[in-house]
Structure formats: structure tokens, C-alpha cells
Amino acid sequence: MNRSTVSLIAGVTALAAVTGFASMSEPEVPGPATAKAAARLPVERTSLLCPTPSTSDLAETAYTSFTPVTKGTGTGGKAQLVAAGAQQADDTSDGSGGGQDEQDGEQGDKADDKDDKKEKPVLALKEPGKPVTGEASGAESPALVGTAEGRFAPGWAVQQTTEVEAGAGRGLLGTACSAPDTDFWFPGASTTKERTDYAHLTNPDESAAVADVELYGKDGTLKSTVGEGIKIPPRSSEAVLLSTLIDEPQADLTVHVTVRSGRVAAAVEAVDDTLGGDWLAPSAAPAGSLVLPGIPKDATSVRLVAFAPGEADADLKLRLASPTGPITPAGHETLHVKAGMTAAVDLGDITRGEAGSLMLTPTGRSTPVVAALRVVRGKGDSQETAFIPATSAVGGRATAADNRSKGSTLSLVAPGRAAKVRVTASAGSGGGTAAAKSYTVKAGTTQNVELPVPSGLKGTYALTVERLSGGPVHAARMIEAAEGGVPMFTVQTLPDDRGTVKVPEAEQDLSILMK
């Protein structure tokens, strides 16, 4: 094997291993290079970012950080979060033995003149398999940026959960802190007088990022120059009030965030004066068929918002995956989405007291769409809101941190074939022993499963979902906490954790790629 071939193999392997946010698939290579299947190895470095939790002085925020145990990761590494704008201190007191020195765009400590900006981590993991927790209070809590390396990188998950007892944003606001990227879709935002929606953009890197925020209403593009070329300083977070980008209020908006340079994590904070608030996470990438899992069985109102980003209209068939099988909602059998326009429909109390997930499929030609649900629980003055975006399948493994002894519900849906799933409850943050259960999810159904709970549980724990066999599985976790008669709740979907990545086997001759 010649030198160029060896160098290429080393480069491809290193790039795939250190980039936790890298593509999960490799390019097709014709000829002998495809003779052997690619190996799947744990990522060695990944990034997560948490938005500024709240502007309320009454906000109480809990953070939970967790990495599942993954085979083949070695013994070194660390995972820690610091306040945005601060440099990570060289703190290896967590007993993890330090980490790899590879780069993923975060340049680390580059000069001695930055030493005075270093901070101790807000949250640092001690070991895989056991969560750690932290707290923050009030409106001054910052956004967080963090990295995980070595044995802490594969499947690293951080949950941010904020409780606001009264005032604007009253309710339980939760989000899974997300990896940086360059393209995000948020159907379900609004700029009506009762709504205050912010797009939070967080930059993890040592150089500034530049992003555009585009808005699409029921009649198409809403022109605005204010949302163009928004600069996000290094290792900082910017909150963009959506109502300042357009002149006329819009009840149903699709927000598109694109990054011109650098990369960011993006989330929309949606606050309603009477219905509380929550975080709207990005929808899965545009696709012809979508799954929106985990509608609460006691939902009193469900509103679907969809957008077709291409040049063709989309005609979608709506079905509810109930505990007994697919159901077509009466009066809402289909939805027509015009190209470049946002469509919305009220589905009412579609679940009618049973677990449910919404499945969208094309009635004819497949046209890519994005979608999300706004879900309301309660009645009158005691209502609370959460959002469920379309999400990708669990894949190999997915994790939800910050589960409590009471008030956590896990929904599993198999939109096609039946599937077998294993759910593992980690040790508690304050003590306890991990537990696991396996479930079979019938085709076209949603199950709210009885969760395994760690024996001797103290504190919070993480849930890890693994598909063992069968068809694709989509999942969502709900946290609820009643406060003053208000059914506060938040829902997070569980896409694949991207803890592993395909890399070519070392003995494969990839010299064909040099031609």
C-alpha cells in the first residue's frame, strides 16, 4: 500500500472519530473499496449548547448531564459545561484523566492573555453511567457551552428544565441542549400580541458566527432585512425577538435559521401570556413522511403547523398512532401545504384519553415538509403549553436526562413494522442502581411504557432507549409537575444520539478516492 493511501486512511479515520456532529454516513465508493462493511466506532469529541433559560426573576433552572456507558471508548476524557463567554479551565479534577487534543472548531485555550477569562465548569461529569445535576436561579443565568471528550463523548446528553411559578412564561420549560449546526427549521412560532417568541442563537467557537433568520407565514415569505446577517460573537448567545423582524402579527410562523459562517445551536423560546411557555426545538430535516411522538393522553388542544420548503405543494395524510393501531382523525384526514407557505390546523383533543403520536405521510407524490405540534393541557386559567417537533428515529440509541421518581412519561411509537426496544434507567444522581426493561411496540401503535426505576433512587436519572430489532422507533419523554392547579409539563423528543460514526476499515484500499 503506498504512502498516499495510508495517509488518506488515517485522515478519514481521525476526522470521523473526533467529530461528534459529523455525518452519520460515508460517501459511496465504487469498486473494491465497498467490499467490506465500514466499522462503527464511538465518537471522541462532541459539543452541546444550552440557551439562556429565562428572563424571569422567578425562574428556577435544573441542569442534568449524562453519558451512557459505551464499549470501546478507553478510560480518558471529560465532559463539562461553562457559561457562554468564559474559557474552559484546565480542570481534570473529575478523575477522568484529561482528554484528546483534537479540534472540532473549538480552539481551546490559545493564548496566555485569555487565562483571566477561564471559569470552573458549571457542570462536569464524574463518570459515564451516572448523571450529575446543577441549578441556577433568576433572569441572570447565562447560556452554557460545553464539550465532551473520550469516554464521555458518545451519547452525551444535557437537559435544561426551568420552572416559572408566575408571570410571563409561567410553566415548565424544558429543552435538550443541542449540538451546533448550520440549518434549522422551526414550524410553530408566532408573533401575535399574546406571544413573545425569541430565537436563541449560541456560538460555541472562538470566531464570530453570522446567521440569517427567515420567517414564512400563511401567504409565504415575510420580507425583512433585520433578520439578515445577525452576528453572534465568539462563545456567546444572542436572542432575537421575532416580532421585531416583521411589521404585521402572524399567528402561525415557520422560522428558518441558516448560518453563513461558523455554526450555532438554535432554539425558539415561545411564551404565551395565558397558556404558559416552552422551548420549540428544531424539526427533523424536511422529509416526505414525518412522525411527531408523545402527545399527552390528556391533551385538551393540539395544533399542527407544517411547511413545505421546496417548489412543490405537499398533500399529507394524517393518522394517529393509538395504543391499538392507526386512526384517521375524523374531519382531519388530510392537510394541503402550499409550497413556501405555512399551513396550520386545530386537531382538538385528538388523543381522547389515550397515548398517541401523529404520523404524516404523502397521499401521492412525496414532497419534503417540516412540522411541529403545539399541545395544551388543562382548561381555563389553568392551561399549559408544550411543543412536539417532528423527529428522526431512535436509531441505535437515544437518551433523555432529568427523569424524576414521579412525573416522567416515555412514549414509544413504531410507525411501520413492530419493534423490540430496551429501556435502561441509569443510576440516580445521588445514588441508586441502574435497571432495564424490554418492550415490544406493535406496528402503528404508541405505548406509554411503565418505566424501569433505579432501585434505591436518589436524585434524578437518565433513560436510554435502544432499538433491538424490528422497524424504526420514535420516542418522546414528558416531564410534568403540577403547580397551583396548573398542569405544567414539557416534552422532549429522542432522536439518535449520534454516539457512533462509520469509518472505513484500515485494510481497505481507498486510493481510488485520490483519482
Image: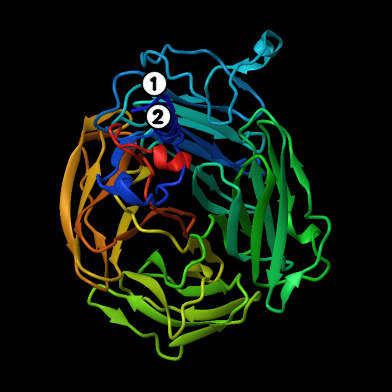
* Marks 2 and 1, how far apart at CA: 9 Å
Foreground of the two, 509 or 319: 509
Which residue is located at x 51 percent, y 71 percent?
368
Q: What residue did someone put label 1 on?
A: 77
Q: Earlier in the sequence, mark 2 or mark 1?
A: 2
Mark 2 burial class by Cα count in 10 Å: few <14, some 14-19, many 20+: many
Numbered tag placed on residue 224 in the rendering: none
Number of disc labels: 2
Kindly identify the amino acid type of the residue bearing the numbered disc 2: Glu
Up-down relation of residue 122 to residue 375 (above or below): above
Please, what secondary structure does the residue beneath circle 1 have? Answer: strand
Up-down relation of residue 3 to residue 315 (above or below): above
Quarter assignment of residue 272: bottom right
Q: Is residue 406 visible?
A: no
Q: Position of residue 423 (x, y in %)?
A: 23, 48
Q: Position of residue 136 (x, y in %)?
A: 55, 32
* Left or right of residue 3: residue 111: right
Which residue is located at x 64 percent, y 15 percent?
110
* Left or right of residue 38: residue 110: right
Foreground of the two, 458 or 421: 421
Q: Is residue 111 visible?
A: yes
Which residue is located at x 33 percent, y 43 percent?
404
* Left or right of residue 61: residue 194: right
Q: Position of residue 367 (x, y in %)?
A: 51, 76
Mark 1 burial class by Cα count in 10 Å: few <14, some 14-19, many 20+: many
The colour scheme is: rainbow
Numbered tag placed on residue 44 in the rendering: 2
Image quadrant for the N terminus? top left
Mark 2, mark 1: which one is toward the viewer? 2
Q: Position of residue 37 (x, y in %)?
A: 26, 45
Which residue is located at x 42 percent, y 81 percent?
318
